[in-house]
Structures are given as C-alpha cells and as structure tokens.
Amino acid sequence: MIGESMAQRAFTTILEHFVATGRAPHYTELSDLLGIGVQEAREAQRAAVDASPIAGCWMSHDTDHIESWAPFSNIPTHYLISVDGIQRWYGQCGMEALAVRWLFPGQEVVVETRCLDCGDTIRVRTRDDEILEIDPESAVGYMPSPFARSRAGSGAFN
Amino acid sequence: MNLFRSEEHLERWLLYSQTAGDYVMTVAEWATVFSASIFRRRLEPDYLARSPTYLEDYRRALKTMGKTLPAPDRFLSVVMFTDIVGSTKQAATVGDAEWRSRLERHNDIVRTQLEHFGGREVKQTGDGFLSAFDSPAKTIACAVATLREVSDLDLQVRAGIHLGECEALGDDLGGIAVHIGARIGALAAPNEVLVSGTVKDAVTGSGIDFTHRGTHELKGVPGAWELYAVTE
C-alpha cells in the first residue's frame, strides 16, 4: 500500500511537472522523478488521485493516464492558459483556470476562452492577487451543483 | 464549470438547465473564491494532509459570496478497506505475468465475497478495494473470508473496517468515516482484520471475538481511537 507521504510526493511532483512542461508525467516518468519502481509509481499516482480534495484529479476512464490534475487539464480544453506570453497550459475548467495564477507567483497569467453560447472570446488577465483585466466585464461562471453533476452528462466540461 | 460572456449568454446555452444550488457568479467573484487556500496552496509539501482544513476556507469564501457548498447526501455505512500487503515487492519477485494472474484471481475472490456478504464495491484503490456494507457483522465475515481465500494465492491481505456517516459523491464515497477506514486499514497487520471501537460496539452479542490493539491517533482525524483485531 502506498503511504501518505508517497501519495503527497506523487501529487506534488505531478503538479510541478505540469507547471514546468504543461503536461502530466506518464507514470514511467513519475517513476524516475520519484526514484521508485514503475509499478509503485503507478500506484502512487492512483493514491494521489484518491487523496486529492474536491475530486480535483482523475485518470482517463479505465486507464492509468492522467486526464486532469487541478487546476490543469492534460488534454487540450478551450481554457488556454498563457504565462508571461507563452501558451503551454490548459485549464481543467473555467473556475480552476482562475486558480492557475497561484502556481506562477509574480508572473502574468492569462486565461483565454470562448463563450459556449456565442463563441466570442473571454479573456482574464491576472498576476498573483491582482485581476488586471476581465474582458468582457460582464463575464460569468456557471457551476452546476451538486458537484456529482459536474462530471458525466452535465455539460460541465463541454 | 464554464465561462460565458454574460448571464444572458449562459441562459441561452443549449445545455443550461438551472437547478436549485447551481452557482452563477461574475468572473471577478469566482476569482475571489478560487483564491481560497485549497487552490492557493497546492504546492505545499503537506497539502493533502491539510486539505480538510483548506476545504473549510473554501466554504467560507463561498459563504462571503452568499453561496454555500451543497449539503452532501449523507448516510450511515460500514466501510471496508482491503489491501495486498507488500504488493510492489511481490510483483517484482514473481514477475509481471504471474503477478497479473494473481491480481486477477485476488480481484475475483474479493468480488465474489462482496456479492456473497451483500457488500458493494465502491472502487479499487491501487491493489486494494474500498467496499461499503449495511451490516458490520457481515462486513467482518466478508473480510475474514476474503483473507482466508486469498491466502491460497500466496498473498497477504489486510483489512480495516469502520462504521460512520459517509457522503455520496456519485458512485464514490467521501467523508471522515472513509478517511478513518483507510487509516485503520493502513494500521492492520498482514492477514489481520482491524476494526474501530465503533464497529466492535455495533456487533456486541454477535459472537465475534476481538483482541484490543491499542489506542491510536489517526492522522488528520481528531481524538484517540481504540482499535481491535478480529479473532477467529
């Protein structure tokens, strides 16, 4: 069984890999990063998923491939994240995209997306605690509730 | 979890069907809510252990916006964690093909016993299972039978059982009772069924015998916990 400290190490290492590269490590890479065997790394990422709060991390169905690791998505979404002008990251959802800034202290983080109704752009520019720009200012976020609805069939990730 | 150019755009969205408790806020308000510790401190080295506290901060942030986290569906349940002891080492010893074969047979045994004793498989946790039951006595019987059956595969399994209120998270279970069950499972010795005092008290008169395994602090869980091993 994977202990809590290994689950924590896996959780942090995967997140740091996202920050550095824009994607999740495969568990074979995680194995190298943690200095553990491949099988143990596979279990460690599973343990990290189970321990992650607000169901923020998950695998692609029936695989050991990371699909989402809040606040990031490992598959392209329409929440494009740029840091200091470089677009390399994707937000898990519209709200989590607003939390990406906490992983890039002191840097300008821009979320660019499209309105699901009209397709026009929405842009949010931040740096740490500062909201530098919201365009348009009328932009809103919609979160279905309860959160169980936020996955399959709810339209939450459309 | 999506953004729209305005509330009017949201209301025109094909998939929009507002239900009580849905949250619609301006992006500026969401940016404030998503400044709570649970989002801000993700790279802290002890983030997972602290996350229950950080979740409260999230609740407070929502409350300042006049919102509350929806009350989860709570119900009393027995939770059982079973886990193969030393799976990584065993996998390395016997090789991938043999390990896969043993793992499949182990999974079959667990599922057969769950069906027999009326348990529900909630999910697999690495090489183990989280299961839920209505009856603590049947849970213990299931754990004992499972451990006995898998010993034929030259595997050592341990089990942790707790009874408490759980939260429904879709098909998954959440809540402190699940955390307690996991902690108890992690403390069980190989081939041991370890239960909380709550479970022991609940099966008084059932004829099940226990050995006291001491008082323990369970990480992230308040209080001291009396744990008992099931004696066959």
Image (cartoon, coloured by chain):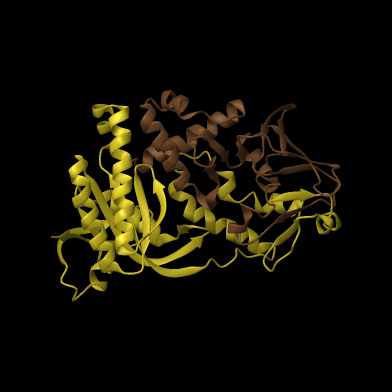
Chain colours: A brown, B yellow
Viewer-proximal residue among B180 and B231: B231
Q: Write down the quadrant of residue A105 in the picture.
A: top right
Residue B161 shows in this picture: yes
Name the residue at 54% across, 52% down.
A54
Task: Establish if B44 lies above or below A30.
Answer: below
Point out the image quarter for the N terminus of chain A.
Answer: top left
Spot occupied by residue A65 in the image (x, y as percentages of width and height): 52, 34
Task: Establish if B124 lies above or below B231.
Answer: above
Q: Write down the quadrant of residue A93 in the picture.
A: top right
Task: Establish if B200 lies above or below B42.
Answer: below
Spot occupied by residue A154 in the image (x, y as percentages of width and height): 67, 55
Residue B218 shows in this picture: no
Instruction: Describe residue A157's horizontal placement relative to residue B81 as left or right.
Output: right
Viewer-proximal residue among B212 and B190: B190
Spot occupied by residue A129 in the image (x, y as percentages of width and height): 69, 44
Instruction: Describe residue B167's horizontal placement relative to residue A106 as left or right.
Output: left
Name the residue at 56% across, 56% down.
B57
Name the residue at 26% across, 38% down.
B86
